[in-house]
Amino acid sequence: MPNTNNSIKELPYDKHSAISIYEYSKGLLGKSLREFVYDGYSQREGKGGIGQMVENLYFLLETNNNPEADFSSAGMELKCTPLKLAKNNDYLIKERLVCNMINYKEVVNEDFEHSHFYIKCQLMLLIFYLHKKGYDKLDFEFIFSVLWKLPEKDLLIIRQDYETIIEKIRRGEAHLLSEGDTMYLGACRKGQKGDSLMEQPYSTEGAPRRAFSLKMAYMRTVLQYVLDSKQSATVNFTIQKNELVSEKELSKSNFDEILLNRIKPYLGKDYHIIANEKGVDISNNPKNKFAMITNAILASGKCSNINRSEEFVKAGLTMKTIRVQHNGTIKEAMSFENIDYIEVADCEDWFESRLYELFSSRFMFVVYKEQHQNQGDYVLDDVFFWTMPQKDLTQAEEYWKHIKENIINDHFSEEYWWKAKDRKNFHVRPKAQKSSDLSPTPNGGWAKKFCYWFNNDYVRNIIDERQK
């Protein structure tokens, strides 16, 4: 029966026990809040509305702005996060997990262990629900419940992320924060365009509202664990597969430094020599030989593709090799994944789009440079981490909107897309695949697969900026 008395004192769980609260949460699975709402209850609006209503209607808690965790007696925070269905009916993460707002003036005086984020989110009760476009919030079905303690190794990286964000604010650069600055913990945009800017302590320039959040890539690993484990609860979980760096290494140095130190001894060496030293067979001149060599250096045999390593997957970090010709030109444009036409059409917010996630994530660029014109004698020249600047992300939003407009209007031939010759930094074209490869469209039809690309001159600009 729905509770109609918010002043109830007897809770149906032990508020001091995370396990008791978790066990009680299972009663919500397979149901919606419609079963618990009572006459006179005011539905909560906004993105946090679902979480507030779960607190009120199911856990019988009053909503408050207390910086402590929702279940403070158990040291546990409640987080409700949406899923969506893929075209094959698999569950997908819909958005990053927002943890708490960033108060620029206060956060610069907090160390990690005493931060609101750490106090609230080191142990979380995550409740996943299925979001359906056009449905009332009271009718969303709850699917999974998981008791999630941030693993110690992840906390080492998250601490580094936190300090990166705080240091940028202390430099008076809160307005320059980007989700691409960090690995697992991001400083995501909050609010709408046109919202008033917030004051920051070490600059007179206003900064957009931001919140600490666990990135979509990280949340995918949490969801995958729940799906793989065939159970809903865990207290502490660490992916052991394809580990790139160890917890011991992270306790002594940050992630970036570990990888950069692995590659430094090979800078200036011819790629043939590196391949021989690392035991990489490139006798058949494979197209991906530079990626193979780079993987051998960075992974030290731990995984064959660092883009599939635990840390890269959780961070949404991408390693890309770049070949610079002797005259400084970049011969090839840089490809990404195929466009999911249905995802683009269904996405209403640029900041929640797959393309925003791709382009705002961090990149590790590994540069091989030709020593003599047309000789193909490439040496390992440079390696660096890169994040797309805000002005380019603004243009990327125009790129995405143009793609979305064409998809909605059922325009899927090359004449409609941005082209490399338009010199707009990004373009759309197929990868080298069979022309018969098709992808479903929102109208129920099928269209040729097209891919997101960086123009080669845009890649050259990235290299030029690095050299400056």
Image (tube, rainbow, N blue to C red):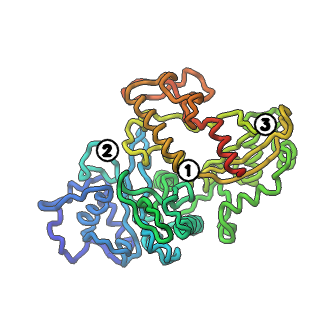
Rounded to the nearest angstrom, the CA distance separating label 2 from label 1 is: 33 Å
133 relative to 407, above or below: below
Q: How far from the left and from the top, in percent, is residue 466?
A: 69, 51
Callout 1: few (<14), some (14-19), or many (20+) C-alpha neighbours within 10 Å? some
Q: Which mark, residue 116? A: none
Give the camera-side residue of 76 and 174. 174
Q: Which amino acid type corresponds to the residue marked 3 in the rendered image?
A: Asn
Q: Secondary structure at mark 2?
A: loop
Q: Which residue is mark 3?
A: 327
Give left or right: position of 298 versus 438.
right
Residue 423 spot, x, y in % from top left? 58, 33
Q: Is residue 49 visible?
A: yes
Contact (CB < 8 A) between labels 3 and 2?
no
Which residue does the numbered mark 2 point to in the structure image?
132
Question: 437 or 397: nearer the eye?
Answer: 397
Q: Nearer the viewer, mark 3 or mark 2?
A: 3
Q: Decide if residue 297 is on the left or right side of residue 36.
A: right
Amino acid carrying label 2: it is Lys
